[in-house]
Amino acid sequence: MKLKAPDIRLEELTVGYTEEPVVQDLSFTLPAGKISMIVGGSGSGKSTLLKGILRLLPPMDGKVYIGGQDVVSLKGRPFDCLRRKIGVLFQDGALLGSLNLRDNISLPLREHTNLKEKEIQDIVLGKLSLVGLEKYLDLYPNELSGGMRKRAGLARAMVMDPILLFCDEPTSGLDPILSAELDQLLLEMKERYGMTMVVVSHDLESMRNIADYVVVLGFGDALFHGTLEELENTKDEYLKRFLNRVAEERKTTRLTMPTLDVGRLKLDCKDFFESLQGDQ
């Protein structure tokens, strides 16, 4: 049975911690089969919103619809069925340190399918080949670079052939070449698998490379939601500064404190620092 990727519709959604909302009254639709990016400043609630959609944080108010299903009220077997077809790439990869790469990627298939081990290993090899890690099956997470762990996390997120893929800061900590390669991989997967993707990021270059739809968070609200083209043509002054990485003008300097006198160090370093000055 081939499944069609659904859209994600938020209706007056409020998410936060204890009794303090972080984002509130959000209403928009993330389109099916497209890449939607959630961007915004640090602390604007990007990852919190992602947790609310995934129900890792119970919403304080509002609704989340995936296709025609109200996810907030979904329980039991229907909710478990939905979770089987959702993939999540966590910010740090979230691999299990006690398992090698082969077993990390195999784990969802062993837990949730009745596939034979040979079938599982064929799928694992295919997913690792997708991210260029097929030669590293027996390595453990601490033996991989940060970029490799990120790609391994993506392979695990993809191993159950999800119809929904959520990525939290997929390019953070990666060099420009690896970031570009990951962007290209997400685009290829969208074309190949037709998934609905939701990507949380602060990477504006990545947004311009892959986004079909963009949500800009700030001040606990959605400052913008719409197509990338609509965002690029915005007349809003804050959004233009955000897109162009222009700092807010300040009338006073931030740097008002005097520098620390090395003579205040407990260790007597005066002679050493004088020697560093040479004949200056």
Image (tube, helix red, strand yellow):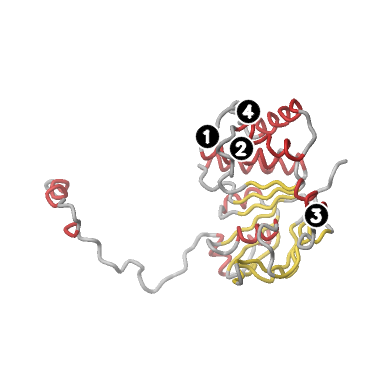
Q: Are marks 1 and 2 in contact (CB under 8 Å)?
A: yes
Secondary structure beneath dot 4 equals loop
Q: Residue at x 77, y 44 (%)?
A: 194
Q: CA distance from mark 3 to mark 1?
A: 37 Å
Residue corresponding to mark 2: 152
Q: Residue furthest right?
A: 1
Q: Nearer the viewer, residue 221 or 152?
A: 152
Is residue 254 toward the left or the right of residue 138 in the image?
left
Residue corresponding to mark 4: 134
Which one is earlier in the sequence, the residue at label 1 or at label 2?
A: 1
Q: CA distance from mark 1 to mark 2?
A: 9 Å
The percent position of residue 226, horizontal first and vertical second, equals 70, 62
Say which amino acid is labelled 2. Ala
Count the marks: how many?
A: 4
Q: Residue at x 57, y 54 (%)?
A: 204
Secondary structure beneath dot 2 equals helix
Say which amino acid is labelled 3. Gly
Q: Nearer the viewer, residue 108 or 216?
A: 108
- Quarter of the figure that contains the N terminus: top right
Rendered position, 66 above or below 183: below
Q: Are marks 3 and 1 in contact (CB under 8 Å)?
A: no
Is residue 53 toward the left or the right of residue 152 in the image?
right
Residue corresponding to mark 3: 76
Which one is earlier in the sequence, the residue at label 3 or at label 1?
A: 3
Secondary structure beneath dot 1 equals loop
Residue 219 lies in quadrant: bottom right
Residue corresponding to mark 1: 144
Give neighbour class at mark 1: few <14, some 14-19, many 20+ (Cα, 10 Å): some
